[in-house]
């Protein structure tokens, strides 16, 4: 824990609330248009928390998606921040190529001897605009995450908060959401299969129905 504090990190945050919504996705995934598919769903979960007057309603959202580091300068983190009127941080696992910023260029920045001991480099485009930051889990690593402003927050604050929440490559709020949502889905699939078995009997279940 002392070592983590020296690096500007804190002990992994405790999960105090989980909420899930099972939906049928009717909007196809189109790169760069994630917000049109996912923002309404996330907003419903937030509105339910507010309606239920839960004490865990967030003061800030860390979003598994980009903020201004986006071809149109307005990714999922921006959309959700505006709609929910909350500060948001965009944390992308993949880079959108914007304003001359490419993966090879980011790699060159990370490999630059001047950045050898740094865990973060600023992403400045050809226009001179600062789009975000690439953060790696340790010096020498070349698999960064991409942090950008979503809504009502500075890049400096984004970086500081992500660093505080990082134990692995992906910050803990997003990592835990990934882990727990997959487990929830897996549990639901198990219940669905059991219902099919109970209704038809194991020998009568068509094999193509077992793929959920």
Image: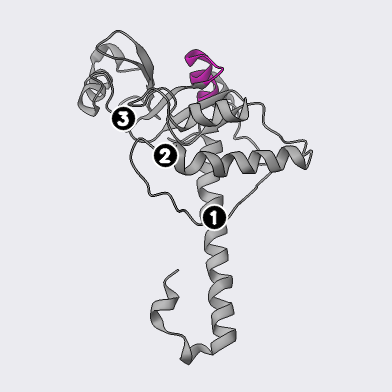
Residue beneath label 3, please?
A: 96
Q: Which residues are magenta?
A: 151-164
Whichever of callouts 1 and 3 sits on the residue coming sooner in the sequence is 1
Visible residue check, residue 182: yes
Q: Secondary structure at mark 1?
A: loop
Residue beneath label 1, please?
A: 23
Whichever of callouts 2 and 1 sits on the residue coming sooner in the sequence is 1
Q: Quadrant of the N terminus?
A: top right
Nearest to viewer (mark 1 / mark 3): 1
Left or right, 147 with respect to 114, comes to: right
Q: Which residue is nearer to you in this view: 103 or 136?
A: 103
Residue beneath label 2, please?
A: 34
CB-based contact (under 8 Å), mark 2 and mark 1:
no
Visible residue check, residue 16: no
Residue at x-position 56% and y-position 44%: 41
Image x and y of residue 9, in percent: 55, 24
């Amino acid at each position: 824990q002392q070592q983590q504090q020296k690096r500007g990190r804190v002990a992994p945050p405790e999960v105090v609330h989980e909420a899930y919504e099972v939906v049928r996705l009717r909007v196809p995934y189109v790169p760069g248009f994630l917000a049109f598919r996912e923002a309404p769903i996330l907003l419903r979960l937030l509105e339910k928390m507010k309606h239920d007057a839960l004490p865990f309603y967030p003061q800030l959202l860390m979003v598994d998606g980009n903020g201004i580091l986006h071809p149109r300068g307005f990714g999922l983190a921006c959309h959700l921040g505006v709609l929910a009127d909350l500060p948001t941080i965009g944390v992308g696992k993949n880079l959108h190529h914007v304003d001359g910023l490419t993966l090879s260029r980011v790699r060159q920045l990370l490999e630059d001897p001047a950045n050898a001991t740094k865990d973060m480099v600023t992403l400045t485009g050809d226009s001179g605009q600062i789009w975000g930051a690439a953060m790696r889990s340790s010096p020498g690593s070349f698999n960064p995450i991409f942090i950008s402003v979503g809504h009502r927050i500075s890049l400096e604050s984004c970086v500081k908060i992500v660093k505080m929440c990082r134990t692995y490559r992906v910050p803990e709020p997003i990592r835990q959401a990934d882990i727990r949502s997959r487990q929830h889905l897996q549990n639901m699939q198990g219940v669905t299969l059991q219902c099919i078995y109970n209704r038809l009997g194991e020998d009568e279940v068509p094999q193509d129905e077992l793929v959920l």
